[in-house]
Amino acid sequence: MLGCGGSAYLRFGMSTIRVLLGIPSPALARVVEHLLREHPGMEIVDRSDTADALFRDAARTSPHLIVTSERFLDETPELGLAHLKRRQPGAKLIVITCDEGWWNEEAAPGPPLADAAVEAEDLVRSLMPLIHTLAADAR
């Protein structure tokens, strides 16, 4: 799983990156929307306000990128992430965390379910470089 950083040209192999947001906090969702709207080629296809809606919207909207919060995914984030990846296996998944250690090898052995994680306090500085890194990896 990627942490923050990197810089590459922003493309996932298509002209527009379809983004689905699953963030329970309206304030945090506004910050993410603002960051994404600053970059051409990013289209927010939907915003989900519950985990159930996020799972449905992931299947319905076919996003290239899903940005969600670990708090959004229940008491056991790894189960929610697994369900989300099953709904949209081709989408890149970024999880906004409140705790750097929320995911570790002991808690969730095997390959990570999220493609990247960013701490909420580093979101403004780190989200777009992280998306750029994922875009480069998708090529």
Image: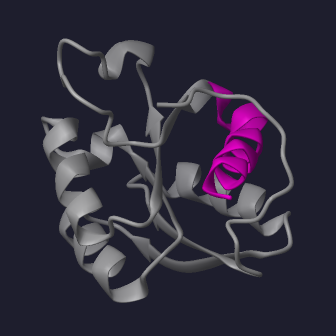
Which SS does the magenta portion mostly show? Answer: helix
Seen from the viewer's position, the closer of residues 99 and 66 is: 66
Kindly identify the residue that appears in the image at 84 percent across and 65 percent down.
39
Image: 108 above or below 48: above
Q: Residue furthest front?
A: 139
Kindly identify the residue that appears in the image at 84 percent across and 39 percent down.
7
On screen, residue 80 versus residue 131, left or right, reads left
Kindly identify the residue that appears in the image at 34 percent across and 67 percent down.
49
Query: For residue 17: magenta?
Result: no
On screen, residue 83 versus residue 71, left or right, reads left
**In this picture, which residue range is highlighted in magenta?**
122-139
On screen, residue 42 versus residue 7, left or right, reads left
Q: Quadrant of residue 32?
A: bottom right
Q: Which quadrant would the C terminus be assigned to in this image?
A: bottom right
Q: Position of residue 127 (x, y in %)?
A: 68, 42
Image: 12 above or below 138: below
Q: Position of residue 99 (x, y in %)?
A: 41, 19
